Amino acid sequence: MDAFEKKTCKTARGYVYTYYTFEGVRSLPTLLFQHDWPDHAEMWKGIAERLVDTRTPIVILDMLCYDGTDEPTDPAEYRWDAMTKDLIDIIDTEQVDKVISSAMTRGNCLPIQMLSHLVYHIIFMTLKLTNLRNSGHFVQRFAARRTYSIPYRSDLHDNHSSDWKISATDEKLNCNDGYGTGSIRQRLLASVLASIQHVRYNSNKEDIPRSIKKHNSFNRQESVLAALLKRISILVIGAGIAGLTFAIESYWKGHTVRIVERRLSQESAGFMERARKRAIPPTLTMKKFNGDVVGSFNLGDEKNPSMAIYRSELHKVLHEYALLLGIPIEFSTNAVDYFETEDHGGVELADGCKLTADIVVAADGVGSKSWHLVGEKTAPISSGFILYRVTFPAAPAMENPIIRKEFEGVGDRGILHAGPGAHMVTCLSGDKMCWMLTCKDDSDKGGESWSQSTTIDKALEATSGWEPFITEVIKATPGHTVLDWKLMWRDPKPRWVSPIGRVVQIGDSAHPFLSTSASGGTMAMEDAFSLAACLQIAEKKDACLATKVHNHLRFERVSSAQKMGFKNREVFHNTDWDYVAKNPEAMGKMVGDWVIYHDPEQYAYDSYQSCADHLLNGAPSKHGNSVPGYAYKPWTVKQLLEAFDAGKPIFDEGVWD
């Protein structure tokens, strides 16, 4: 258990316990694994390691007489009430305030003793009941059904009240994984995840402004049945970055989520522990095309840490995390049409079947079939540029002395070369190397495509005269074949929601980006956070209003970020090198502070009510999530291209950097 810290604690009885902790997010309740079976921490390993990505604090105990914990010889020292007090000493040592108690039981009393002593601490309890014949009467009260959650029974503790819940499962020992716990562990993992989701669903409401909580009758002590009735059923079309991020956020906010994806499997592009393992250092080295170094620039700071990761790797991490949470993802399921009624949204599949939900989220990219319902789909306009990109095993390329020298002593890194009419990004990450060249497109053939390939000849021609490193990297491409992506633009569209509000677009479905904006993935994930927060606030009864509020809160910010792609391209392709020599930071910042230092979830919480009043009653509404000092003005791709052709700089007021 590499993510866990091994600790010891001497209890008031004088016994030394060994236990393991995962810090997680300290504001969340602590997940406590205890009881006599499994008896020591190592036996919880599989479940515990899978829960690390939830960022929930965890404490796992070695019980008396096991592993590193003391072994009393007097049987009386193993009384349940005495061991319960030991556990309370450990909880106090860790300064734990709220506990999600998780245990397996064959009739022993430790979890129930814990409840008696910690009635104010335990807010949720997950039990696996493996032998009801020997279970105490208390546990049997909660085992009438196989798996369920009910409120705390005040008649069992007349002098106390609490908002904790019990999730109990009756499971026979019907398989063996070495400890006789195979299916039981899987079921317990599912129960624990459900308990974390329920607690977070209610706890997250504490972050919502008081006025909104009152308006929506939020109640942290509501019953599980009441919470289930408020859940929104959500169908996500597309398992890309936007769709997966939104599904995960919605899961943690208590909704029922299902994803369908047209691809055959999860094998090409479109938590945090996994992401860090696949990330490269968040530093980008900027160079002039001849090899002169402009500088190296961090992509974040101590207060706002950043992580550089391939889009495909981020996609894999999100997919793995969604599967960990148990979110259904169905592949080879192609949505060919969208529809809505007053009661639900839906899609028709290629095989004629129809799927419906309270809210349908179109996250299926620029080719989404949702446009006929949401609004007019604008025709793509050529930007006049093309992107050549490829990823390949690094080992053969690193045998080239010119390439090897560039990465010696620094390991994984990213490099951006800027030159006349083109720029190229080269990355080394672990055993993979990639390069992406954006340059002028002198061909008039072909339209939008994400899978067309070509030879490296055009790339070599576009970088003729650049430093030898660039030439060698391009020539190292296996088969001398790269993806040929014609960069197309679309005018910003202010409407992403269907007339009733049952279907909403996010990510590229709503607003495709040029790669030079360096914000396409960011805005897709921001969409996910914002929409999930709006739906959480609105709950089921106002879900249609929530999609429209989300759209209104996001459009101007996203449109400004789209425009930034054109501005960045001009910086890289028409660089004033004399100015850069005196002000190297001018090239080092691809996105402004207004993009980096924004919390879309909190912004939705803070702005939801005023935006809803604006949409419903025409009340004044002003956004504060876009470029500081910039009054948004509608723009078109044609206007920007005409200004570029005329040699006119694209200037806007406000602080864009």
Image (cartoon, helix red, strand yellow):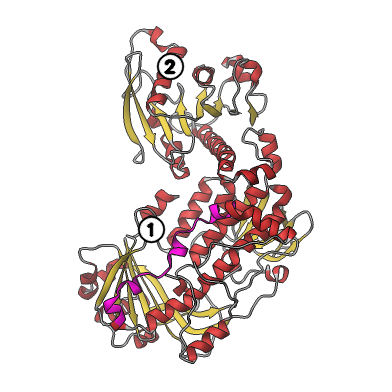
Q: Please tell me which residue lies in front, 504 or 452.
A: 504
Q: Which residues are magenta?
A: 579-605
Q: Please tell me which residue lies in front, 574 or 87.
A: 574
Q: Main secondary structure of the magenta part?
A: helix
Quadrant of res 617: bottom right
What amino acid is labelled 2 in the image? Lys
Q: For residue 537, which numbered disc appears in the image?
A: none
Q: Please tell me which residue lies in front, 249 or 458.
A: 249
In the shown orientation, is residue 295 left or right of residue 204?
left
Q: Secondary structure at mark 2?
A: helix
> Is residue 78 placed above or below 164 in the rendered structure?
above
Where is residue 197? Give x, y as percent: 56, 40
Residue beneath disc 2: 85
Q: Which residue appears at 20% of the width and 71% of the height?
A: 405
What amino acid is labelled 1 in the image? Met
Q: Secondary structure at mark 1?
A: loop
Quadrant of res 264: bottom right
Q: For residue 307, which numbered disc appears in the image?
A: 1
Where is residue 399? Give x, y as percent: 23, 70
How crowded pointer 2 is (Cα within 10 Å; few <14, some 14-19, many 20+) is rated as some
> Is residue 197 placed above or below 451 in the rendered structure?
above
Please say whether residue 601 is one of the residues in the magenta stretch. yes
